[in-house]
Image (cartoon, rainbow, N blue to C red):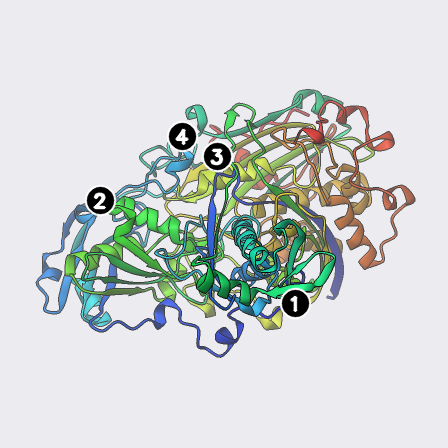
Amino acid sequence: MATHKGRGVSAIEYPTGMNQNGDPSQAWIKIKPDGRVDVFAGTSDIGNGSKTIQSQIVAETLGVPYDWVTYDNSNTDSSPVCTGTFASRATFVAGMAVKKAAEKARERILEIASKELEIDPADLDVADGEVFAKGSPQKKISVADVAAAATWTYGELITGTGAQLKPYAEIVDPETGRVDLPPHSAISYAACAAEVEVDDETGQVTVTRLVSCFDVGRAINPTLVEGQIEGGAVQGLGLGVLENCYPYYPSVEHRGAQFGSYLAPGMEDLPKLETLIIENPSADGPYGAKGIGEMANNPQPPAIAAAVYDAVGVWVTELPITPERVLRALEAKAEPRREGKLVSFDEELSVNAIGGGALRFEVSA
Amino acid sequence: MKAVGARLPRYDGIAHVTGRTVFVDDVRIPGTLWVKALRSPSHHAKITKLDTEPAERMKGVHAVVTHKDVPLNVYGHLSALGIPGDEPLLAEDVVRYKGQPIAIVAAESEELARAAVEAIVLSLDEQPALFDIRKAFDPDAPQVHHWGNWYPHFEAEMDRRQIRKGDIDAAFDQADTIVQGVYRPAAIEHVPLETQVCQVVPEPNGRLTIYSCTQALYFSMGVVAAHLQQPLNKFKFVGGTVGGGFGGKVDTATETMCCLLALKSGKPVKWRWTREEEFLCSSTRAPWHMEIADAVSKDGWILGRKMLTLHDSGAYCRFSPYGLTKHSFHHTGAYTIPNLSFDGYVVFTNRVPTTAMRGFGVTSVSFATETHLSRIAEVLGIDPFELRLKNANRIGDTSPNGVVYTDPSTVPTIQAIADSLGHELPGEYRAMTPAQREGQWLPDHLVSQLGNPEEH
């Protein structure tokens, strides 16, 4: 009886924004008389950090400090449409809407600054809360003074609105799945390595290390990106070795109804986590960003399954890889059926074995 | 300083970690009634009697709502995507899963609401239930759904999602080896720390204020407006700060029912699911059944893939047809496979409907196809990094539905993992980039699938 170490790898991709698109997000911005910024967007923050990310995009686009930005997503009376926080779209799609709104407000700021400085708006730039002449930055006016002038001198409200929508991609040939437009806006990529220890007496799989590399397009906030990847890694670990609503699936009996009878990962399950970020910018995302919120829990389960094979020589292809499943697999030591050039695994799980024959998975070897 | 790329503090981080963020359950409205639901005790049954009068007569019970009170009881959440509605807000003549809501009550305390639910008279005629999606197609299988046992309304009224590309038979003829396997990831719970919760306040001006934990304010408002057959300005959704969702809070599980009770009682109402309801009655990530056969050459090229997917939708379709379509579009993963034959079915069972969860539609296929690739590497005796790099999608390659990849990062992400593990790659794999294929990376079988990246 011994503990065996193993390592497995995986590589995945994931689309950003709703599949087939057609999912709008909108935003609007107003500037207070002292230059402070109110952003109204309808994007729910589910812990993913979209309030932070969208505020950073607005601050960057307007050229004002982050702490000048107030972000309001609190209600549908003041905030415009956001299709929702899903499909990894809160940065990529909704972030583009706030960026476009900020670009419009920025144009108005430069137009009013132009009157105050008597310099063409095309020759002006804005950064750190100040509008300045390109090439001669000593000629400048603060955004606060611009906003005050708009309010008290010119009788104007500086606003900007923005909307992002990619048209819906129709499936024009349902026989082949062909579409009339690209069904995705951007695709993110990741690879992962898992290291495990498998106890061949208890069947226990302990994930000891997860190394992940994600192409995020552009990390708007590296801390939050790392948080998504680390949180996703632990959720992927749960998928791989712990969680199951139906312990005897497909039976519905013995469902866990409390935290004590449903195994979700806890701090004691945390492996060594290493995160690498690659920035391959998307042409369609705000500042090149893609979305990786969802895919963060996708690469671990297959890397863990391969690591378990590497450790003890059995493939467990039903998730989660519980001690019971490992022990049963070790006992069975099932070999694939080899016939001609066919190498066929898991035949006992197939519709061909379980179903009554009306649906079959036919492969001619 | 630059805001983009900076490690700035989370906008609401201090409030979260000091417990001062106001979530829906923190909202306090005087005079609020408490909501509880009568849920199906059966996995599959005909409703033969439903008498709510004993509950309505109880002192302190202000409203009881059944399907008769809903202006539009069946509304398709994805009707905009051509997916028709199938799920009643409140069950009418049949219940298809244990936990399905049949009636809801609003009373002056949670205890009283629970007692009122128990006072409702419900008689059921038990029906056989189906749980194994692999048996759904059998001629003698229990009939789960009024559409049949699998979703029949894909484009052109097809009963499955199909992908066809290249010449699958030729690929299997040419293959040196065919590797076949079955992959079955489990249903899991979203486990948000904040259970489903909603507070609705009828305002003096006739509007409804809805404090909601939805992940999608406007989507949920559209769902409520459709069920109630009212314009959007009847409603004000308040939310945007959610205590964990992971996909499960797109369902709009509580908002419409709370609105109906608030309108019927004329009082504010609140529904806060117990942890047990969250585990047993809320939707889950779907269980999937995937069978893959890959035609491979002895030097590790994947020439073709044949795949069958069964998606366990539970009792109603919710977002499942969308999830399966997304799944099919990504069933080659991060690789280029020129010859494909994919068939996928959304299959109904008598379990709680499944729904979106982090990685919807793709988490399953990533597990299946990546585990399968690891197996192919083992069967052929090829390094798993090299097998992946060889077949990695490149600029100018095309996806399962013929869309050109313009900026894939499969190659550099795999190389980065190899580097971090100290795994030595042979020179030609170390030098590989995502650039368009040429030379040894453009074998004959990959020529016909090439597209023009400039056109996209």
* Camera-side mark, 1 or 2: 1
Q: Secondary structure at mark 4?
A: loop
First of labels 2, 3 by sequence position: 2
Q: Is residue A266 left or right of residue A10?
A: left
Question: Which numbered circle lies on residue B92?
Answer: 2
* Camera-side mark, 1 or 4: 1
Q: Secondary structure at mark 3?
A: strand
First of labels 1, 3 by sequence position: 1
Figure check: B227 above or below A239: above
Q: Quadrant of residue A7?
A: bottom right
Instruction: Tell me residue A325's x, y (percent).
Output: 60, 55
Quadrant location of the N terminus of chain B in the rendered image? bottom right
Distance CA(mark 1)–CA(mark 4): 47 Å
Residue furthest right in the image = B427
Q: Is residue B296 left or right of residue B116?
A: right
What's the amino acid at mark 1? Answer: Arg
First of labels 1, 2 by sequence position: 1
Figure check: B386 above or below B207: above
Q: How many discs mark residues in the rendered view?
A: 4
Instruction: Tell me residue A137's x, y (percent).
Output: 71, 62
Question: Which numbered circle lies on residue B345?
Answer: 3
Residue A317 vs residue A153, the one in the foreground? A153
Distance CA(mark 4)–CA(mark 3): 11 Å
- Taking the spot 51% from the left edge, 51% from the top edge, the residue there is A101
